[in-house]
Image (cartoon, helix red, strand yellow):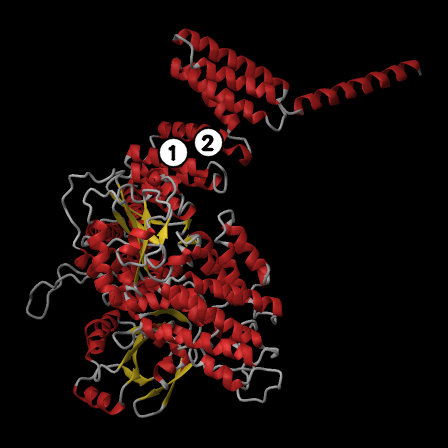
Amino acid sequence: MRTRIIHCFLAGLVACLSIGFAKELGSPVPPDKLASLEAALNASSDQSSDARKRLSVKRVIRDSDKLLAAHSAAPNRFEVLGHLFRAHQQLYDLDDSSRNRLALVEISKELVKAPNEYAELRLNADFLLLQSGLSRKGANAKERLLALRPMVARYRDTSAEAKMLRVAMLMALETGDVRLINYLRDEMAVRFPGDLEMIKFQRQNLKGQILGAPFCGIFKRSDGGVMHFPADALGKVTVLYFWSKDDPADDHIQRLATEWKKQREEISFRINIVSFNVDELPDAGEKILRDLGVDWPALHLPGGRDNPYYKAFPQKDPAMLTMTPTGYVALIMSGSTRRRASDTGKTDFTRWFQSALARDWSQERYGNQLTSLFAGDFFVVDPEGPFNPNLPPEIRAGFPVSPAGDSDGDRAENLVPKETLHAIQGCFVQAPLRYRMSAEEVRDAYQSIEDLCGQAIVDFADASDLWILRNRRIVAQLGLWKLSSNHEHYQRAVQEAKAALEAGMPKGAEVVARFCLAKGALRDPEAEPRKVIGDFVESQGGDQASGPVLAAAALLSLDVADCERYGEYRELILKRYANHAMMWTFTSFLLDRYHRYWLFRVPFVAGWTYGRRQQWDLSRGYQDEVERYVKAELHTLDGKPYRLPEDSKGKWTAVLFTNSWVDDKRARLPSTVTRYLNPYIEKRGRDDLQVIVAVLDGEVAPIQKYLKEKPLNCEVLTVPGGVSNPLVRQLGILDEDIGTNALILRPDGSVAASLSEMTMTRSKHELIPNIISWSDEEAVMALLEKGEIEKAKDYIFTVAPPFDPKAVDGKGRPLKKPVENYVHLRARAHVYLALGDKKAALNDAEEVLQFLKEKAGWMTLLPKGLEEAEELVELLKKKGEE
């Protein structure tokens, strides 16, 4: 009995000792111990000789090892590992023996286990192991890129992410890895779009290249207000003008001001100049500007040439940086210094303004569309038809499926009269005509809305639906602000938004007011943009937020140049609301390839390669990444109905929308069909594609007469109502008066793509054939995956028949080898491989690779697909050796 008691006592004692020891191991490393290590490590570098430095570092290593042994489970043990890593680094620098190298690697393996809160400590260890592994393997460019991508993901949203990207970029530059450099540039652009240190880093290290960066910041105006970039400048071109009163040339600002005044009437609504004086004048140079007769906003630049914005952006003065209507500036990454006083070249501002107005991003219709979106017109305009006072767009947008309502029904006495509402709503012009209005016409329309709403709010102050007036007044003031850059209009919009919310609004009607106030919240220098925007969405439904809420969030993301968050909201909108009538205007903007191309693009087009890059990008044959359907009734030239998609006969259908080319020669439609599409259809040999010409304007009789003389060999229809037809807004048809828009329907009747004139014109007639050809490749690859090799062979050999080099024509002359779309050749290579014909597969793969290499030289840019083409050729060569 006594023995049992003793055993129990000893067991309990051991347990207690174990618990106590475990607690000791898990207790945090004392801060004073960590501070002592830091001091000792810093002191070691001050030793007078290498021998003394080695002794000092080894003492740090011993002390660190003891601390780790005593606190092996401590949450902050990684701080000790960080000191140990640095000590081993110093020791290896002093003695690069294999023993020291191995010790450094072993410490790195432990340190990389640290959680994200210690990301900055573990980063160098991560890179050391990465480089060590790549060196042992003798990794090529692709292997380096593949190895780095997981590391980029590992450090995302950590305090070390920016540093990780910078270190990785230096590694890529050292090896000359172009693909890796481009990948890291893309990461920097998405993750740190307006980060001044990241911009400065790229300009210093990627010399001679062009960087596109958003200009983001909040600056104090000379009148005491603030200007928020890019938000306040979105919708029109803005010139950021950095200047000094002590400019050696002494006349730069005078000449610029003189030319501005000469051309003010033409350019003031399309180009805005914002002044940044670098002399830290008390009034930011306002008096000098006013004495010159210009009303440019004068912004303070604290520190002048030492200001971080100056060091990241102009880096010299006088400097004029052009910012696009979407907030991006082009920078030469050269780390240049201030212009010398001896410089004698003077800018010809007459030509400068002419050139600025000719740029793609300066075009009036392009800017008008952006201004309309940023002002929020689409929130209060029904794209499907006339305004319905009993079911305003704000309420209609809240239903899963847009309901219809009786716009002429009786209204209660406590409501704003429908005649008043119709008069106000009539000032809003439907797209695309809204985008063709002159700036003066748009300004007058917004001002009329403001005046009518202001009077109606007084006349019907007790109406229960006063919110309808307030929403439209907010939009009008935002529109006037965008047009004039007069901040007073924004302040009035804010006042109206607050009044609307205080009075109470029905569910779904608050979006406009809260959108306006969220813009104000983002103007706070202490604001966290993502939190502000996230709270905005959360306050209006969160995960169940309506389409307009998500659209507003996307626009707010553009206000702060958050392209990543914008992309997330874009994806949600297309997934949930692409077919909702109240979202047609915004959805068509999201899908427009031309807008997508320029939204985050560097505003630089000098040199012949930039136009080629645009053409290549806009011509790529991808389909819209959304499930959409259209139902429309068009008319044949003899008045019979033609229903889409029911009458499309189960074929690919390309519907080309245009004005009558008989009445307006600018349309150039017959050549589009006869020179490009009809030959493509004939060559395909599958009888699965048809072209329809849909005329939006013009008399039928002249068209019929024209077709008798010059048949197009395709169906020609008319669109009832022309540009007033809701189909125009559903598809985002633009500029049909000067060119062609297109709708591509799949054989099942769903929408493969809708293409605006801006896209069609710049894709050089290649886009529609490319969309069909890319679909061919997808179909062939799907058949191969299912093991249906013969079907895949029949398909690809029909659209891209094998060429017999010995073939001759009727006169015995050798036939010229036809030019096949490279995606057809790529698909055919895979079919040949499945058939066991490795030689034919390699021939096609090499032809694809050669084509893409030529395109890379043609536009001095690596095209997408080049890397995959190289892999395919390499694979086929290996198989040929087996």
Who's the residue at 53% across and 32% down the image?
Answer: 118
Res 689 visible: yes
Nearer-N-terminus badge (2/1): 2
As shown in the figure, which amino acid type bears the numbered disc 1?
Val
Task: State the residue position of label 1.
Answer: 167
Vertical relation: 100 (above or below) 162: above
The answer to whether mark 2 and mark 1 are in CB contact below 8 A is yes
Q: Regarding mark 1 in the picture, which secondary structure is present there?
A: helix
The x, y position of residue 856, in whole percent, is 23, 50
Task: State the residue position of label 2.
Answer: 123
Quadrant assignment, res 642: bottom left
Label 2, label 1: how far apart the Cα atoms are = 10 Å
As shown in the figure, which amino acid type bears the numbered disc 2?
Leu
Res 103 visible: no
The x, y position of residue 416, in whole percent, is 56, 82
Q: Regarding mark 2 in the picture, which secondary structure is present there?
A: helix
Left or right for 318, reference 582: left
Q: Nearer the viewer, residue 523 or 754?
A: 523
Vertical relation: 754 (above or below) 803: below
The x, y position of residue 676, in whole percent, is 21, 71
Q: Nearer the viewer, residue 29 or 356?
A: 356
Q: Nearer the viewer, residue 849 or 685?
A: 849
